[in-house]
Image (cartoon, rainbow, N blue to C red):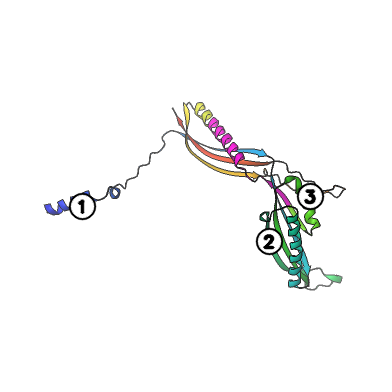
Amino acid sequence: MKSALALMALGVAALPVAALAQTSVTIAETAPVVTLNVTESVEAAPDVATIGTGVQTRALTAQAAMQDNAAKTDKLIAALAKAGIARKDIQTSGITLSAQYDYSNQDGKPEGPRFIGYEASNQLTVKLRDIKKVGASLDAMVAAGATSISGPTFSIDDPSPLIVQARGTALRSAKAQADYYAQAAGFRTARLVSISESSSGGQPPMPMLQSARFKADAAPTTPVEPGQVSASVTLTVQYALDK
């Protein structure tokens, strides 16, 4: 029996240290903790405009509608490239083909829908990197055969510097608030315990929507006002209040 016990003891002693170290210790924060959500934004002039455009065509057959649409879309893309827009900044966003019906009742007589042909649509998303040319680009799209335009949406291509600025402002604001709570509650200082971040950069300030202003008067080009866009950072921080 003694030999068996000795062998068991020897076996336990021979186990790797990692196999025995199964205990985890978590030290809970004993001081009062204040949790703050702080959002700060920085505004700047945009340097990119994104526009949706495209061509819709109709024909009696699906093939004819698609072929006509392809030819007109090629013309539109060629015009965009000729205007200096890089191919990487032109992206197909949707192609659709659908049958079209006339649901109106002629002569007041109830009758079923009347088939009138097929409609094909090819939509493009275009990124313009020269804000000053947005209005002229919209007019060029229409002249090249575009039958739909949406936008523009303004943004900043690289919002990193704005996010850094907003992050610093948010952290300073959070520390000031935590210090206020500490002093108001009779504590000596506020000690940072945790921090998490969410950010968005270079987009129009919400809820404002940016859009082109179209005029029917003698304006030579479509007027567009880019305004300002913002980058924002939201910090969730926790401070322990120490005596």
**Amino acid at the residue labelled 3:** Ala
Answer with left or right where residue 20 lies relative to residue 96.
left
Residue drawn 83% across the image and 48% down it: 215
Residue pictured at 78% horizontal, 70% vertical: 59
Label 1, label 2: how far apart the Cα atoms are: 69 Å
Q: Quadrant of the C terminus?
A: top left
Quadrant in which the N terminus appears: bottom left
- Residue 79 in the image: state x and y as whole percent: 76, 57
What's the mark number on residue 94? 2
Q: What residue type is labelled 1?
A: Gly
Q: Position of residue 216 (x, y in %)?
A: 85, 50
Q: Distance between the residues labelled 2 and 3?
A: 24 Å
Task: Tell me where the magenta segment starts and ends, as one range.
Answer: 151-177
**Label 2 is placed on what type of residue?**
Gly
Query: Is residue 99 in sight in this rendering?
Result: no
- Image point 67% across, 59% down: which residue? 93
Label 1: state its secondary structure: helix
